């Protein structure tokens, strides 16, 4: 197998199975996790629980996810990491009952979030993330691992505001009675949110956005590869987007050919990191 980049339109990744109710154990080999940030934190779709390895691993770190039931996936993500800074590549594999079989390898182009795609994997209960590097393996952190399903939309968001990612910094300005201006600064982390607006789409795409991705994943982690990044395995420019489904809207488009239903849908996401 190998990671793929055959889509030509925006990719939505959903139905993440890396959750405590699905994952029995997460173990790490060739490295020692910080006691306060163990490998078991990767059971959760919370990128701020994190796995941290503060000392140099003895060899290429290996992280195994054992599921309580067989799973099949078409996409894998890494969120809130510093693997690019550490010079690591990534490889995902599944266990076929006898040995591990590679799904694909990739080299991150930044410490930004990354979603890789593949053909549907065979059913397996153990999946492996290998952090590949020739030698001198440095410390690293990893916020979350995503394993789910992906689909390309039939029609991209349109217009300059069709797909917008907003970045912000938590601060507030207060003005006192003496006209002095004070700045209250929150946690020094950049926050992000995103909105995808789809107009004049057919019923199948409306169902994908509203039901398959929206309703079934409320408050859960989903990934998005924007239209300008789908033709490459890893981002050439900006990172892929991971966020929690905050809400969605839908409606019918007015006008058009009689009998040819066209609708609209909006997907609202709060950035995971």
Image (cartoon, rainbow, N blue to C red):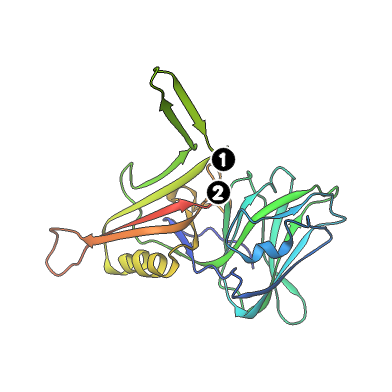
Q: Nearer the viewer, residue 116 or 38?
A: 38
Q: Which residue is mark 1?
A: 189
Residue 158 lies left or right of residue 100; in this view the side is left
Name above or below for residue 259 compared with residue 244. below
- Most extreme residue toward the front is 177
Q: Quadrant of the N terminus?
A: bottom right
Whole-percent x, y for residue 194 in the image: 42, 48
Residue in view at x 66 percent, y 78 percent: 125
Q: Is residue 263 visible?
A: no
Marks 2/1 in contact by CB < 8 Å: the verdict is yes
Q: Secondary structure at mark 1?
A: loop
Q: Residues within 10 Å of mark 2 (few under 14, many from 20)?
A: some
The part of the image, by quadrant, that contains residue 201 is bottom left
Q: Residues within 10 Å of mark 1 (few under 14, many from 20)?
A: few
2 or 1: tag closer to the N-terminus: 1
Residue 273, which numbered label?
Answer: 2
Residue 64 lies left or right of residue 210; in this view the side is right
Name above or below for residue 65 compared with residue 57. below
Whole-percent x, y for residue 119 in the image: 56, 69
The part of the image, by quadrant, that contains residue 87 is top right
Q: Nearer the viewer, residue 117 or 240?
A: 240
């Amino acid at each position: 197998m190998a990671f793929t980049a055959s889509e030509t339109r925006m990719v939505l990744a959903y139905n993440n199975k890396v959750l405590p109710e699905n994952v029995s154990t997460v173990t790490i080999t060739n490295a020692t996790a910080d006691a306060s940030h163990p490998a078991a934190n990767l059971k959760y779709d919370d990128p701020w629980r994190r796995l941290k390895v503060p000392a140099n691993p003895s060899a290429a770190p290996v992280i195994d996810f054992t599921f309580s039931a067989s799973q099949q996936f078409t996409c894998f993500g890494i969120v809130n990491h510093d693997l690019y800074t550490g010079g690591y590549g990534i490889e995902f594999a599944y266990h076929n009952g006898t040995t591990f079989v590679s799904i694909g390898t990739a080299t991150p182009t930044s410490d930004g979030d990354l979603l890789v795609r593949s053909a549907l994997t065979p059913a397996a209960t153990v999946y492996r993330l290998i952090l590949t590097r020739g030698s001198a393996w440095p410390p690293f952190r990893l916020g979350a691992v995503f394993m789910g399903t992906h689909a390309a939309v039939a029609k991209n968001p349109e217009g300059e505001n069709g797909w917008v990612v907003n970045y912000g910094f938590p601060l507030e300005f207060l003005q006192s009675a003496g006209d002095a201006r004070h700045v209250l600064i929150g946690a020094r982390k950049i926050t992000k949110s995103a909105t995808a607006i789809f107009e004049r789409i057919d019923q199948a795409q409306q169902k994908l956005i509203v039901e398959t991705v929206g309703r079934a994943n409320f408050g859960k982690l989903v990934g998005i590869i924007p239209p300008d990044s789908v033709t490459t395995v890893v981002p050439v420019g900006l990172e892929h987007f991971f966020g929690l489904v905050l809400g969605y809207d839908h409606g019918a488009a007015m006008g058009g050919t009689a009998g040819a239903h066209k609708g609209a849908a909006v997907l609202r996401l709060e950035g995971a990191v």
